[in-house]
Amino acid sequence: MTTYAATACAGANIAFIKYWGNLDEALRLPLTNSLSMTLDTTVTITTVVFDPALQGDQLTLNEEAIVGPALERVSTHLDHLRRLAGVTLPAHVTSRNTFPTGAGIASSASAFAALTMAAAAALGLDLSPKELSALARLGSGSAARSIFGGYAELIAGARHEDAYAVQIAPPDHWPLVDIVAVVSREHKAVGSTGGHALAHTSPLNPARLAHVHTALARARSAILARDIETLGEVMELDALTMHAVMMTSRPSLLYWLPGTMAVMHAVRSWRQEGIPAYFTIDAGPNVHVITLPDYATEVQARLRAMPEVKEIITCQTGKGAILLGDERP
Ligand code: DP6
């Protein structure tokens, strides 16, 4: 019997201008555009083997067999690709992250970007980066951006084929550093998928939506001009408005811990000393500190010295998703 296999690798990303809330939950059509930097050291490597001898889809994540909701999410995603290829073959997905899960780095972005690329290759689908990005979005909204390296913007189209990411600038345009200050490794109670559905219950959501176009335009031009002051200012404001929406939704989502606040205050005080460091925070308590390469060693040392910081993970601007091997006959 014939099997079709391929392996792909994709980096996680950190959004400078984030999306929170979907127009369509099932299709993961985001309410607004979002803009991120793809990361280099935090990657997912995924092999997909379509094999008619299997009883059903299987998932092995970091050497552990996974069943339940995570397998169902992967199966649903593979269905989109199988439908496109006109096949019904079951698959074994083997995936490995180079970073600890629950460390404040969204593994769904790198996971679904790598899965989409590997499954499409294994099925012999000839897709453009735009089509791959839209498909990756169906698995996890932020995965659409991880198809591209460097800086990418996810366009909030109102139809599946119109909601995909585009590259704003390649990785070598501006080598920023993201130092993740891990203040808690605990699994968060409400993940992004559940959280997105609550955005519209916050009275602050309309204000955030009204501001996002200005924020995106400023962030985009700051990246092109390599202007960390403007990017940092707009990035912090965006993270704070997103968390204001989260905190004021019903039920309220309060992701910050005392350690989160400690790092936010520290980063701002370091700026007073002339260190160009800025924070952003995803749906969790850990803080991403963005700085320039020349200041990375100093920021790392200062974060390590904080009692609230359990561990730091340092990333630079990474490449887009790539195919590592295509064993299709
Ligand atoms: C706060 O893409 O993780 O990181 O589609 O449910 O997987 P799912 O959501 P996800 O949401 C990202 C939320 C965010 C902001 C961002 O990355 O833009």
Image (spheres, rainbow, N blue to C red):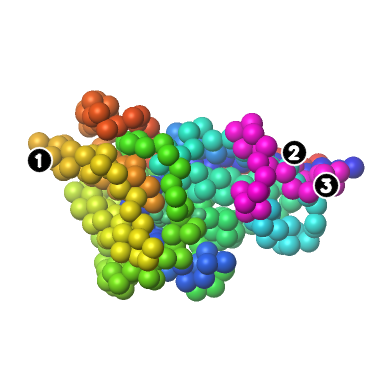
Q: Provide the secondary structure element on which disc 2 rests.
A: loop
Q: Please report the residue visible at 74 percent of the width from the left and 51 percent of the height from the top.
A: 123
The segment highlighted magenta reads 48-74
The location of residue 317, given as percent across then percent down, is 39, 40
Report the amino acid beneath label 1: Gln
Report the amino acid beneath label 2: Glu
**Residue under label 1:** 272
Q: Nearer the viewer, mark 2 or mark 3?
A: 3
**Residue under label 3:** 55
Q: Earlier in the sequence, mark 2 or mark 3?
A: 3
Query: Quick one: label 2, few (<14), some, or many (20+) residues within 10 Å?
Result: few
Report the amino acid beneath label 3: Gln
Residue 58 part of the magenta segment: yes
**Residue under label 2:** 327
Q: Please report the residue visible at 39 percent of the width from the left and 63 percent of the height from the top.
A: 251
The location of residue 138, given as percent across then percent down, is 57, 60
Q: Is residue 247 above or below residue 311?
A: below
Q: In this view, does 250 lie above or below 128?
A: below
User: Is the N terminus in the top left, top right, bottom left or bottom right quadrant?
Assistant: top right
Q: Nearer the viewer, residue 30 or 164?
A: 30
